[in-house]
Amino acid sequence: MTRFRCNGMDVQTGAAPMSRLLDVLREDLRYTGPKEGCGEGECGACTVRIDGEPVMSCLVPVCQVEGAEVQTVEGLAQPVVHAVQSAFLQHGAAQCGICTPGFLMAAAALLDENPHPTREEARVALAGNLCRCTGYQKIVDAVVRAIAKEA
Amino acid sequence: MLACTAPVIRPRTLRDALQARADRPDATVLAGGTDVMVYMEAGVLQPSAVIDLWGCHGLRGIEARGNELRIGATTTHSDLARDPRVPAVLRESALTVGAVQIQNRGTVGGNICNSSPAGDTLPVWLALDADFQLSSVRGTRRVAAADYWRGYKQTALATDELLTAIYLPEVEGEAHFRKVGTRMAQAISKVIFCGRRSHGVARLAFGAVGPVPLRVRAAEDALVAGAPVSEVVRLVREGIVPIDDVRSTRDYRARVSGNVVGRWLG
């Protein structure tokens, strides 16, 4: 049994210890925000935060989150929609949407560390996330203006 | 992916980890998972047992010890990049491993033990004269990075040993790191270069241009002896052993390896 916190709730799973965190989140806990794109850490669609750090949940065996705090995009909107989510809406930064939860989690982690990133800093922080609609400009627009807009 | 029902051993202390390794030489050693999970998903790795070092105390972290920097094996690439005591070329190389999400989990020890010839940090350990600490219930020994890789994915690590730390001596000179790949992030390298030079010392280390990360000693000797840059470049191209593969060609790698050295020295 692995116990951890997910989006502020105490959760547990009886999944095998080497199960992917991504599968436990989606199948057992029904948090379907994190998506499976490539399944090998290349695309970032499964990005979640563990103790605040963005990681690829397809590459984390669930046993390694024992006692940790996991956040998915569902938790990002609690208690209210996060500034970066509002900015994505404002700037039209979502197209088909499958990459969006991963981008939001990577962007939220960046903004916690660096509330006023340059475009270049945003590009580096989001380099592990692919958007196959190629909507990168608007995503970067949203991320660099997320906090500025809130102020 | 088939469900993995292999037992997972999660030692909390180094002593327990070494005992687990001695008891289960067949086990797959897991740290940040950024290689192991990919191999399992692809079906090329079906562990009979797993030793998970992620939560093992004393293996993660960087500390100054005398004239050396001790870097624990499960220190992540993000930890490395953030620490100002770490030489700039090493921090730079850590920031080319995958992207942020990978750097937050992938460990320096994992990169060394996976032993891909294209591991981004590996030529840097060579150029900085790093020692690797290999430990087992029998004791602890140090192996120079230059003696660690023996052949494609073959290393000096015995079946009952774990890589526990890397020691970096204080080294002199100007150092340079260059990764050449299809894009800045997430790309597996076509050529990786790390060079260092000071009076009487030269290191020219490469990745992805041979079965192991390697130094080109003939070119290093020529550089120390004051040979012209063109001669050093020629010896580099002669001293590496690149292949054609999905990422690049032998000819491209030879030409680019010479060019990155020539530009640095020129």
Image (spheres, coloured by chain):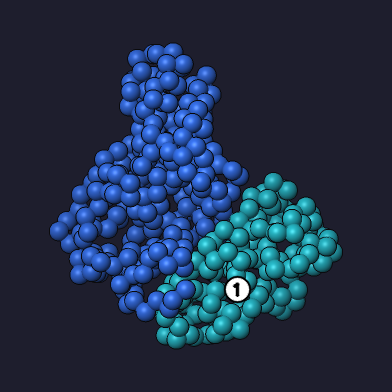
Q: Residue at x 34, y 76 (%)?
A: B6
Amino acid type at mark 1:
Gln
Q: Residue at x 69, y 52 (%)?
A: A122
When the figure is inspected, residue B135 is found, relative to residue A97, above or below; the finding is above
Classify mark 1: helix, strand or loop: strand
For the question of whether residue B177 can be seen, the reply is no
Chain B: drawing colour: blue
The number of callouts visible is: 1
Taking the image as shown, residue B149 lies to the left or right of residue A119, namely left
Q: Bin the neighbour count of mark 1 within 10 Å (Cα to Cα): few under 14, some 14-19, many 20 and up.
A: many
Please give the chain letter of the residue carrying mark 1. Answer: A
The location of residue A144, given as percent across then percent down, is 76, 54
The location of residue B237, given as percent across then percent down, is 42, 26
Q: Residue at x 49, y 31 (%)?
A: B251
* Residue extending furthest toward the left: B138
Q: Which chain is cyan?
A: A
Q: Observer-nearest residue: A11 or B96?
A: B96
Q: Quadrant of residue A64?
A: bottom left
Which residue, given by chain and number where applicable, does mark 1 sit on?
A71
Q: Quadrant of residue B204?
A: top left
